[in-house]
Structure formats: C-alpha cells, structure tokens
Amino acid sequence: MELVYSIAIGVLTASGVWLLLRPRTFQVLMGLALLSYATNLFIFGMGRLSKDMPPILQQAATAAGVHADPVPQALVLTAIVIGFATTALFLVVILALRALTGTDHVDGREPDT
C-alpha cells in the first residue's frame, strides 16, 4: 500500500512540475493545484498509514499515545481550504490578465510561429 501511495504522490508531483513549466497561465494554475494535492497526500501519509485498523491505537501504553495523531489531518484540512481560496484568487487574476492583455501566456506575448 505504501508503494502505491508513494507512486501516486510522485506522479502528482511530476505532473504538477511539468504543468508549472508550461507557457499558458491556466496550465500553471493546474500545476499548482496538483502540487498542493501531492503535498496534502504527503502530509496525510505522515500520520501513519494502516489498513483495516481502528483510529485509536491499541498497543500504545501512555495516555498521550493511545489515540492517533490528529495533527496531519488538521493540517491537510486547513491546506485544502487555503488551497481552494488561493486557486479561486489566482483564477480571478488570470481572467483579469487575459482581459487586459488579450493573451493567456505567462509572459504576456504570443510566440512567433
């Protein structure tokens, strides 16, 4: 399961970086979104992946170690909300830039072909 999880994070990261290097602004936006998804999966994976296990750990002896760590889940939830707001803001800026310049290239110019 960890191998599939690692491959998914790697594919999302590679796709996000590839889209970040594209010349169109919408592709850059999608690359940022994929990178944020990969980061969220990575943070969520740091909270110990286990299959068919209850959320409360039975083998821990101390009172503080009885429950699963909720910090990665809280961080991912916060990152999802912030990522959605950032994507919406970036989309509005892209639309305004497209209306102002007439192109959606990152540098503001159409390539000479």
Image (cartoon, grey):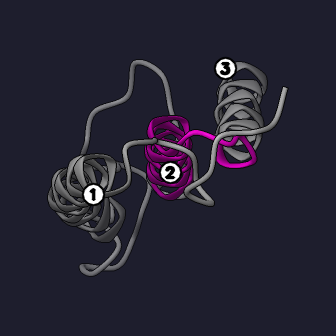
- In the picture of the structure, the residue carrying the numbered disc 1 is 100
Q: Secondary structure at mark 1?
A: helix
Between disc 3 and disc 2, the foreground one is: 2
Between disc 2 and disc 1, the foreground one is: 1
- In the picture of the structure, the residue carrying the numbered disc 2 is 32
Q: Main secondary structure of the magenta part?
A: helix
In three-dimensional space, the C-alpha distance between marks 2 and 1, rounded to whole angstroms, equals 23 Å
Near mark 3 (Cα within 10 A), the count class, few <14, some 14-19 or many ≥20, is: few
Left or right: residue 33 versus residue 66 is right
- Mark 1 residue type: Leu
* Quadrant in the picture for the N terminus: top right
Left or right: residue 90 versus residue 12 is left
Position in image of residue 30 (x %, y %): 47, 37
In three-dimensional space, the C-alpha distance between marks 3 and 2, rounded to whole angstroms, equals 26 Å
In three-dimensional space, the C-alpha distance between marks 1 and 3, rounded to whole angstroms, equals 48 Å
- Tell me which residue sits at (78%, 25%) in the image: 3
Answer whether residue 23 is magenta in the image: yes
- Tell me which residue sits at (28%, 81%) in the image: 64
Q: Vertical placement of 17 versus 39: above or below?
A: above
Q: Secondary structure at mark 2?
A: helix
* Mark 2 or mark 1: whose residue is earlier in sequence: 2
Comparing 40 with 99, the one in front is 99
Residue 1: mark: 3
Position in image of residue 34 (x %, y %): 51, 39
Between disc 1 and disc 3, the foreground one is: 1
Comparing 60 with 104, the one in front is 104
Comparing 80 with 25, the one in front is 25
Comparing 52 with 97, the one in front is 97
Q: Give the extent of the magenta segment.
A: 20-43
- Mark 3 residue type: Met
* Mark 3 or mark 2: whose residue is earlier in sequence: 3
Near mark 1 (Cα within 10 A), the count class, few <14, some 14-19 or many ≥20, is: few
